[in-house]
Amino acid sequence: MIDTKEYSGRNDLSSLDVHKLIILVGAGVSIAPPTKLPSGKALTEYYLESCIGKELTNEIPLGEFLKYDEPLLVSRTNAVSGKLLLASEMSRFNTVGYDCAAVCINDMYAMGAKPLLFYDNISCARPKFEYIRDMEEGMENGCRQGNVTYAGSEIKELSDIFSYDQYDLVGFIAGIVEKKKKIGIAPVKAGDVIIGLPSNGLHNNGYVAARRKLYLTKTSMEIYYESLGSTLGDLLLAPTRMYRDAMEALLQSEIEIKSCVQVAHGGIDKAVHTLMHNTAGAVIKQREEDIPPLYDMLHKDGNISKEQMRNIFNMGIGMLILVAEEDTDRVVELLEAAGEEPVELGLAETGSDIVRYI
């Protein structure tokens, strides 16, 4: 924490405009900036480069907050847990870092917020340099794609808790949203349309069940399946899709997004209930041909019932969006222009919180 009294009266800080002030973010390290900053360096750049030796993705001027009438600072945290078990099994950590950043960034957009900064915590028994490097590079890439400041990592060595080659990765993100534009405050009405955005795999959920039910090993994950068009390892370790372009297209329009949920905190059934604020129900009709073949393998080879599948997995959908019926065509048009292939999954029903699948 920097004591502002320590810098009062200094020539290099006395003329700062509030629009140019920078939010300082730490990475488990405390450092005081010098009296005179290196030529051409912003305060945040010096701070972060001194702490973690990495270039700053972007800056967060406090003037950003002045653009809002009633700004809300919102935050979320997400862990990459079960997927790390497969990453350890395959000795491949080059996608899980991106996963961590993407899941956090998607959560910001699901609230209608602009993501601002991201940082993470990596815990393990004994850090292996190449694994840590791959995870951090993945998070940097995710933050760069999401236009979010990457504030760095805190790495904890906990040999009494974790076994060898076992890792835990947790990300934290903060963002800003106009209070009256925060998604999720509009009431759900009967006939509101549920639109789904496709995932490219399990994303960040259901890995413990997939690993146990399919008896996954390094050898089995290296087998190529014609039906999948991939090895299981490549498909299961594919990074979570980031929905930045799609969500920004909607948020920059005048269309009211009544509710939005990333399918990353349980299966699609839980996500639909959350989308309905747990106060309304829905009728869902997902065509079999719209469900990727990976889920059919999990259903049949894993002996998992369809009801359990919906409780555990995203069923090929990474983001759910609820809009009024009259806005549906325009929303689909905007999503397609942003490169998405939106799917109309169902309709909201009032009178109960039951979700029906037909």
Image (cartoon, rainbow, N blue to C red):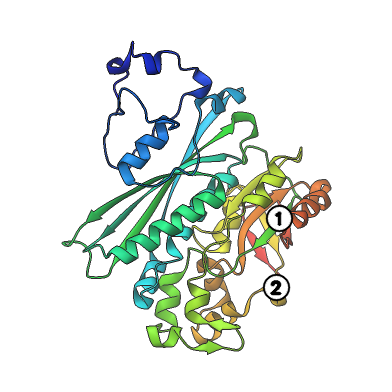
Most extreme residue toward the left is 160
Where residue 324 appears, x then y in whole percent? 77, 46
Most foreground residue, 153 or 110: 153
Q: Is 353 in front, or is 216?
A: 216
Q: Which residue is mark 2?
A: 290
Residue 164 placement: quadrant:
bottom left
Query: Which image quarter: residue 11?
Result: top left
Precedes in sequence: disc 2 or disc 1: 1
Whether residue 228 sits left or right of residue 13 in the image: it is right
Q: Which residue is mark 1?
A: 194
Picture residue at 33% right of the left edge, 65% below the top: 131
Q: Could you tell me if residue 217 is visible in this image?
A: no
- Check disc 1: other Cα within 10 Å, few if <14, some if 14-19, many if 20+: many
- Counting other residues with Cα less than 10 Å from the Cα at mark 2, is it few (<14), some (14-19), or many (20 or more)? few
Residue type at the position of mark 2: Asp
Residue depicted at x 70% and y 73%: 290
Q: CA distance from mark 2 to mark 1?
A: 15 Å
Please provide percent x and percent y for residue 221.
Answer: 45, 83
**Amino acid type, label 1:** Ile
Q: Quadrant of the N terminus?
A: top left
Whether residue 336 is visible to the viewer of this picture, yes or no, is: yes
Label 2: which secondary element: helix
From the viewer's perspective, is 141 left or right of 129? Answer: right
Residue 15, labelled with which disc? Answer: none
Foreground tag (2 vs 1): 2
